[in-house]
Image (tube, helix red, strand yellow):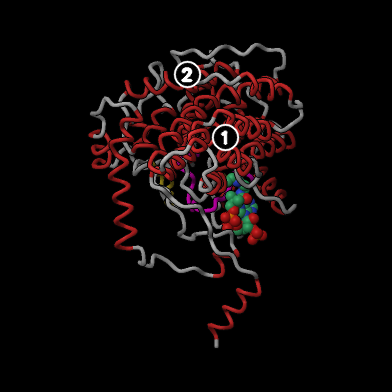
Amino acid sequence: MLSRFALPARSSGARLLGAQRRLASTKSLRETLEDIIPAKQEQLKKLKTEHGQTVVGDIKIENIVGGMRGLKAMLWDASVLDPIEGIRFHELSIPDCQKVLPAAPDGKEILPESMLWLLLTGQVPTPEQTCQLSRELAEKGDLPKFVEKLIDELPQSLHPMTQLGIGVAALNHDSAFQSAYEGGIKKTEYWTHTLEDCINLIARLPALAARIYRNVYKPGNDLPAINKDLDLVGNYSNMLGYGNNKNLTEYLRLYIALHGDHEGGNASAHTAHLVGSTLSDPYLSYSAALFALAGPLHGLANQEVLRWQLAMQKELGDKISHDDIRDYLWKTLKSGQVVPGYGHGVLRNPDPRFIALQEFCQAHPDLKESSIVQLVNKTFEVAPDVLKEHGKTKNPYPNVDATSGCVLYHYGLTEFKYYTVIFGVSRALGALTQLVWARALGLPIERPKSFSIDALQKMVQDQKN
Ligand SMILES: CC(C)(COP(=O)(O)OP(=O)(O)OC[C@H]1O[C@@H](n2cnc3c(N)ncnc32)[C@H](O)[C@@H]1OP(=O)(O)O)[C@@H](O)C(=O)NCCC(=O)NCCS
């Protein structure tokens, strides 16, 4: 089944050549941004002045009452989601990224640092630039003592996502943007302080997320110190206690890189953008985004998928046939529940991130043989037809969450309430990138117009008359 939906052949030649040509620089991330921001500012200014009144779409009642689906209403530069093809990061598809973005010295998978660089700058970093960024993140990765204490005091029973949101919000104690703003800075300087906060936050997420994991699931265990020679996920994996599992560390790198951005309209990215538009600092903005991510229709779906697949395995035993899965799917649907990991607000094809993660499994013999990985794959062979017959969802195919948890589970990271935290570590790459750009481009506070049902009905009536 997987081969039917294989990812597009690696590299669309011209695009890739373009990306590789962008390799030459030896500049730091900040210097690279300093170079490219003026041209983007100019581009936006020209667009606003010359085409501000150009109409690019209609607004229908169904957009307003249907969660703003399909409404063209947000500026988001780093990634675009095509319903059929899936995500592109600055025009690079997932296979393109797998080809050009640097990996760890001992690995093959994309380093999230290189994805962050691509998202922020539209350029492919050299291995040296990636390494330099890894070092900067490691050097800035320690948590302030008061945040450690705060997290340690939280009840073990508090959901890990709630803990993560609390920890991220508390980090705003040291916000460079907030203190510069209070001191009085020019609008043109906003982005540099925002960048400083964003880098600090990304650097600290692994220590925060690992501390939550330790406190909730492995109390009493020591947390290793951050190794300055390791990449962000190498350190995260180490602190989670899985540092010597090379496959799991590589999987986490791939998952965190690929999950880093998915356009702007998804609930967590949009929340960060909305809150950031009030000039709340990146910590507060991203903390708000994490609470959007904590909803079961969004980031929490990955925990739900595993719970559902394990319940299926428990009920049906080891030798599960396609017919068994079909019956189980119908049972779920007839009880009024959604099939977790299937469907999407935008995608209308299997999610290429699902395909890429499944390909990772197929490339590792132990994962290929894993009963939970096989069950996820087998479910994929049956579920689209069942969902088509059910006839409700616009997209009967799997999204990334259909598979994201099974590798973690196979390697012993079985605490699936924690899985959305890993998603939260990942999504910071894209959401924080846009906060830097929102400040660089001087985007205003968001303020869409709302209407009551009566007002909408009146508009309909007025058009009829
Ligand atoms: C992702 C999701 C929230 C998108 O929602 P959406 O944009 O409203 O999706 P659709 O327009 O296709 O929904 C139309 C109908 O199909 C239903 N539907 C969508 N996905 C479904 C699924 N996986 N199983 C059963 N029914 C589903 C919806 O609940 C809706 O039913 P309703 O008309 O009774 O309200 C939805 O597909 C879902 O709930 N999926 C399961 C959770 C999940 O995997 N989330 C992770 C997303 S990355």
Work out which residue is located at the far bottom of the displayed protein and give it. Answer: 465
Q: How many marks?
A: 2
Q: At 51% across and 44% down in the image, what residue appears?
A: 279
56 over 432 or under it: above or below? below
The location of residue 187, given as percent across then percent down, is 41, 44
69 over 157 or under it: above or below? below
User: Of discs 1 and 2, which sits in the foreground?
Assistant: 2
Residues packed near mark 1 inside 10 Å, few (<14), some (14 to 19) or many (20 plus): many
310 over 45 or under it: above or below? above
Is residue 369 left or right of 135 when viewed as pictured? right
**Which labelled disc corresponds to residue 424?**
1
Question: Considering depth in this image, is 44 or 365 the residue closer to the camera?
Answer: 44
Evaluate whether residue 355 shows in this view. Answer: no
| Quarter of the figure with residue 32 | top left
Query: Is 190 in the magenta?
Result: no
**CA separation in Å, label 1 and label 2:** 18 Å
Residues packed near mark 2 inside 10 Å, few (<14), some (14 to 19) or many (20 plus): many
Mark 1: secondary structure: helix
The location of residue 337, given as percent across then percent down, is 70, 50
388 over 220 or under it: above or below? below
Residue type marked 2: Ala
Question: Considering depth in this image, is 370 or 344 the residue closer to the camera?
Answer: 344
Instruction: Tell me the magenta residue range.
Output: 340-355
Is residue 121 left or right of 274 when viewed as pictured? left
Q: At 63% across and 18% down in the image, what residue appears?
A: 145
Q: At 59% across and 62% down in the image, what residue appears?
A: 66
Q: At 41% across and 33% down in the image, what residue appears?
A: 116
Work out which residue is located at the far front of the displayed protein and give it. Answer: 183
**Which labelled disc corresponds to residue 138?**
2
The location of residue 253, given as percent across then percent down, is 47, 26
Mark 2: secondary structure: helix
